[in-house]
Image: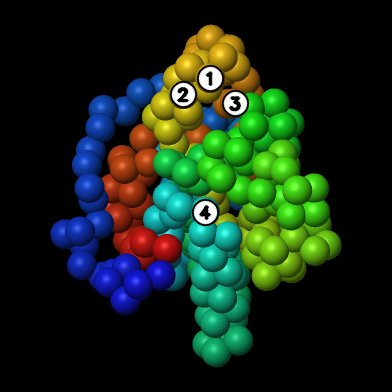
Amino acid sequence: MSAADSFTTDRREFVGAVAALGAGAVLGTHRSLEPLQVPAADAWLERLKGKHRHLFDVPEPEGGTALRHVRNYLDAWREAFGVADKDVSVVVTLYARTTPWGLQDAMWAKYRLGAAIGITDSTAGAPLVRNWFAHPQQGDPVADGTPESSMESLQRRGVVFALCNNALKRWSARLEKEGLGAAKDVHADLTAHALPGVVIVPDVLVAMTQAHERGFAYVRS
């Protein structure tokens, strides 16, 4: 992460665009990870009550570096300042090339998502067909090869991953062009197989605006 991207506090650069809200979000509680339908597209943010609030903007996989940043952020609050995880609210946005992070292993295999974002499983010598960002196995290079930096571990600490529905639509159209199914069917498949606990938001830029309006700091990670 470059110095220019490091822990930006200029709120004027926080919002890149605002799009019209579409359908309601699909939500999983950030601790129990049980799926839950909510009536308002921003209701998931109302559940985040931590005194300290931060949003990590993550459009690129980069080997899971952002996941290490989030883990270190939570660890620093706890170890250096004595602040418990429950008092820190963290949102991580998934869109662009991190869209597959929010999806289950079956989707990685079915739609060849590892190949789509250029990630090779060195143990298999082939494009990755499972989501090692969510649940790395022994020997995986992602997240330092440790489960503490996995998405699942961070979710247990209260981190919420917000997956952009507009990005899912773009990915669905791309996969249609690759002959992997009609875009509407692919989209339905992807949304039905989001990781437990991942929040599908109508548009990630709107989610950033809504988080900013609720006092979340911002960093591009």
**Looking at the rendering, which quadrant does residue 65 occupy?**
bottom right
| Helix, strand or loop at mark 2 | helix
Q: Residue furthest right?
A: 138
Residue 8 visible here: yes
Distance Cα–Cα, label 3 vs label 2:
13 Å
Residue in view at x 52 percent, y 70 percent: 69
Q: Nearer the viewer, mark 4 or mark 3?
A: 4
Q: Which residue is mark 3?
A: 190
| Helix, strand or loop at mark 3 | helix
**Looking at the rendering, which quadrant does residue 105 occupy?**
top right
> Identity of the amino acid at label 4?
Pro
Asked if the residue under mark 1 is in contact with the one under mark 2, i.e. CB atoms within 8 Å, the reply is yes
Q: Nearer the viewer, mark 1 or mark 4?
A: 1
Front in this rendered view, residue 83 or 193: 193
Mark 2 surroundings: few (<14), some (14-19) or many (≥20) residues within 10 A: some
**Quarter holding the N terminus?**
bottom left
The disc label shown at residue 187, or none:
none
Q: Which residue is mark 2?
A: 174
Q: Which residue is mark 1?
A: 178
Give whichever of discs 4 and 3 has the lower sequence position.
Answer: 4
Q: Nearer the viewer, mark 1 or mark 3?
A: 1
Distance Cα–Cα, label 4 vs label 3:
19 Å
Asked if the residue under mark 2 is in contact with the one under mark 3, i.e. CB atoms within 8 Å, the reply is no
